[in-house]
Image (cartoon, helix red, strand yellow):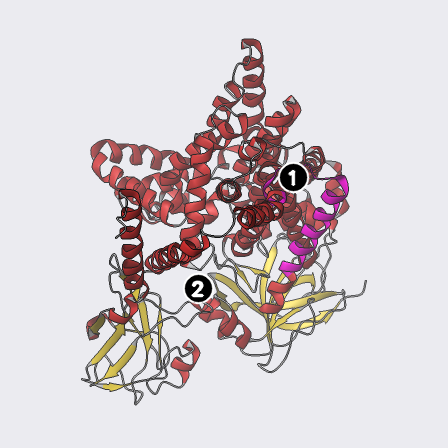
Amino acid sequence: MKVLRPPALLFSVLTVLALLVGLLLVCARLFAPIASIQLNPAQVTHETGLAYVAPLEVRSNLLFKFRFDAPGSNASRLALLEDGKPLGPAHSAHAEIRQQGQGRFSHWGAALWFSASDATDPRTNGRRYTAEAKLSAQPIWNLVGIVLLAFGLLAIALRPAARLSERIAHAFATAARQILVPVVKPRQPSLLAVMLMAVIGIAIGAGAVVYGWYAGDTSITGLAIARYLPVSDAFGYHSCATFLAASGEFGESLGNVWCVRRVLYPAMLASLLNFTAWSSQLTLIAQGGLVGLAIAIFSLAVGSLAGALAACLAAVLLFFYAWEFIFGLFMTEVLGFVLGLLGLTLLIGFCKTKQPYHLAAGASLLSVGLAARAGALLALPMLCLWGLFAFPGMSHPKRIRYLFITLISVLIGPVLQFALVSLLGADVSGTGGNYAASLYGLSTGSRDWSQAYRDFADLFQQTESVAFRRIYKIALENIVANPDVFAGALIAAARLYFTTLFAFISVTRVNVLLSLLAALGLFRCAFNLQLPAARLLVALAIAELLSAPLIIDSGELRIFAVTIPLRILFCALGLQWILQHVIKAPNEAYRSFETAEAKSPLSLATITGAVVLMLIVSPATPLSRIGQLRKVAGVGCPTGLTEVVARLSKESQSLTMVEANAKIASLDPFRITPTRLQDDSRLPKTWFGKEFLDLQPLSSLIRVVELSGQNAFTVKPLLLDGDVRNDNARYSLCIDEKSFTEFAQVKHYSIKTIKQLPE
């Protein structure tokens, strides 16, 4: 009888345990518990029509979770009973629940949208409504179970395989190395490869914008309709950029703070409007192409650091993020994202070239990006600290030199912000964001950045600078008086940060996998701190980790637009490290944390960065006169109506609701069906979605540039009963300012008459 040695015995025991535990975890769904919730009529609210909404939340535990429907996924297993009788159908569209009722329901997020079987009010009809659903196993345990099962089965299968000849095993290992080594080895891209990647990136970025229009999809932020018509903050930035491009200055008549709060992006947007002949469509496409180019450049830099496969992973993840937060939006995230990609590319390249101008360019672009899209601001002081200790064994004079270059460079962003505001004739005291509001929310424990605007509404009747100074003082007093409340808020915010690192990808299992890869990449950098690139990435990671609890409540993932490439780079490094160990590459150069020469991507990053900076400063130069408009006299309107002179197809931007069976006929004016928005986008879930979906075809929302009157060059929101003309002529529009429809808290005034003006 053969006696197993301790190592063999332990391996056999572990194999059996892996098979048993893995089988249990994979089959966990078979013995998942059933949750039964009786709806409380006092908590049910009437939505619209026949639809009612009830809160529906079951706390997840270590093993099981409560699944619900999400965009593109009918994951909910919930059954709704009315006095014990099942209702349905489930997963119904909210519009069908509102209009048809008859027991239709939808389990969406933490709420249940439902209707009674006979169009009665479920709050008062005396019936008992019960929701029942079988819980689902947590995705992570499915993954762990599959891994354990695979390990057990592989361990059993490899026993006879171990008897194979050494020659066959060696041939297999050699083949694996021949396939994987080329894709994990850092390589210097050729000029042709760089140009080809740049063209592909521009094409995909611009194509993503156009595809979003035809798909009718709305970004996760809900700041644009069909990635086309700006809403809320985006409308503010578009309005002030329009005024700046049309007049060459910030006018007092604009009456808002958008133009000076984040002046760098509106300035760039004004330049794009100028250079695209006032076409909002071309401007969005140009923005998409610029984003795609920046992603391509950064992916090439990743390839020079971690190989071709890692570069592909980085490009895919960056395009996912851009799809959710960048493409088709007039938001500061566009500029911050682009400059973050370019700046990090140049800083990584500096670690190899040691050229001071790469350090200066990279740090400057990162600084301007953080001035445009406020985020992990601790990255700037941490960058200065890294500049002092970037290279081991560096002489003292050189350390001081790099520190001085970095220090001057990180000041470029704030200096450019204040200088541009001053040159454009605005009040510099209005610059800056709402850090005070975020700090106040943390100090009260609410973590709601908008709380300060409600609590101190009277202060905001004055200037923002006065209000924010006062709120800063109150927030600090709250922190001193209740440090435990502030600490609890920070801990909760930090927890949110760690659980949403890759939440822009809707698949939970992928999020977990990417988080593990990023952690592995971070550990890899921590183990190689003798290398400049590793020191850079660890320093920036620490800066983001320390910044996150203070800022994440102001916008969650989109607040990190400038530094999001960092965590994606960690994923790429983690993937490369795993593959290097899989193939057991004999060449130490594959295992080290070295960067291949990448001069062409660095040159392209520098040129692109310079072009972006030129677009930012252009409104303060003679170039701004290219697209400036002239005031146009009108012909007057009947008593009680106000005249607006505008072109309906050039400077204006319109969205027309057409019949459900129609198609998008053109992009100028933009046409879309309510059905497309209802079924294919996140619009119905936004706070203003119902307002747009209630538009009757044919109805057009128009944002025209007013060419006459004291408010010339401001954007006037109008509503037209019919389709928009597309002949590039000037029109006298008579509107009734007492008749309007409010969409997303913006009044759209009804057009009563239209008369074409002679040129």
Vertical placement of 249 versus 203: above or below?
Answer: above
Is 201 included in the stretch rendered in magenta? yes
Q: State the residue at coordinates (45%, 67%).
A: 71
Residue underneath mark 2? 686
Q: Amino acid at mark 1?
A: Ile
Toward the viewer: 490 or 249? 490
> x, y (%) of residue 535?
49, 27
- Position of 278 compared to 375: left or right? right
Measure the C-alpha gap from mark 2 to mark 1.
32 Å
Vertical placement of 618 versus 676: above or below?
Answer: above
- Farthest front residue? 1
Rendered image quadrant of residue 634: bottom right
Tell me where the magenta segment starts and ends, as one range: 182-209
Toward the viewer: 281 or 603? 603
Toward the viewer: 730 or 452? 452
Is 448 included in the stretch rendered in magenta? no
* Residue 478 appears in view: yes
> Dot 1, crowdedness within 10 Å: few (<14), some or many (≥20)?
many
Q: State the residue at coordinates (26%, 65%).
A: 57
- Position of 592 compared to 493: left or right? right
> Dot 2, crowdedness within 10 Å: few (<14), some or many (≥20)?
some
Q: Amino acid at mark 2?
A: Thr
- Position of 569 compared to 484: left or right? right
SS of the residue under disc 1: helix
Residue underneath mark 1? 616
Vertical placement of 347 versus 136: above or below?
Answer: above
SS of the residue under disc 2: loop
Which sits earlier in the primary sequence, circle 2 or circle 1?
Answer: 1
